[in-house]
Image (cartoon, rainbow, N blue to C red):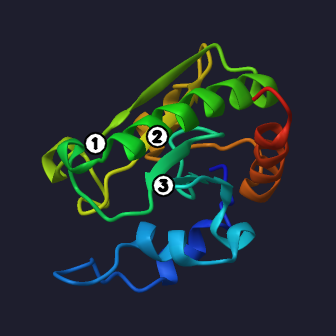
Amino acid sequence: MDVLHAPWRIDYILAPKNPAGAGEASLFTSIGQSSDDEANYVIARGRTGYVVLNTYPYNGGHVMVVPYRQIASLDELTDDEALELMQWSRRCVQALRTVMKPQGFNIGFNLGKCAGAGIVEHLHLHIVPRWEGDTNFMPVLANSRVVPEALKETAAKLRAALAAPGV
């Protein structure tokens, strides 16, 4: 049997699992209020929201665009928040194309628990780069994903790309 090592998963395994309840800040609110962008894999910040690398990604380079305000539905977004969310999405696609050369993207929201939202109380937009053949036997048979680069390195590359003029 082959052994796969995913040392970044230990943080998730050992972390407290207290879902946000009424009046409690979501994980995304806590990250948005933190100043430790490197530890939280925040790759860019705007006026109404920020971009964060998913620490449990579907694929390498999986980022999320998150409003600072903790809201659960699209109709709660202000026009400024909606506009900035889309502007960050466009810039992230450009940065991912430059850094990772994907052949396609899955972009979208999971609104509500039954739709797959892991953090139901705080809307966020997923941007997942895709390559031909990136789905293989690992997720099907081993319930595992293989991410080809450490998150810290991917975050640094995407930060640099988003800081470049014209992106």
Cα distance, mark 1 to mark 3?
20 Å
* Crowd band around label 3 with a 10 angstrom C-alpha radius: few (<14), some (14–19), many (20+): some
SS class, disc 2: helix
Q: Earlier in the sequence, mark 1 or mark 3?
A: 3
Image location (x, y in percent) of residue 116: 25, 46
Amino acid type for the residue under numbered disc 3: Thr
Cα distance, mark 2 to mark 1?
15 Å
Image location (x, y in percent) of residue 128: 53, 33
Which picture quadrant has residue 151?
bottom right
Q: Which residue is mark 3?
A: 48
Q: Earlier in the sequence, mark 2 or mark 3?
A: 3
Amino acid type for the residue under numbered disc 2: Leu
Q: Earlier in the sequence, mark 2 or mark 1?
A: 2
Look at 53% across and 76% down and name the residue there: 33
Q: Which residue is mark 2?
A: 85
Judged left or right of residue 136, residue 125 is left
Image location (x, y in percent) of residue 164: 85, 36
Residue 110, label in figure? 1
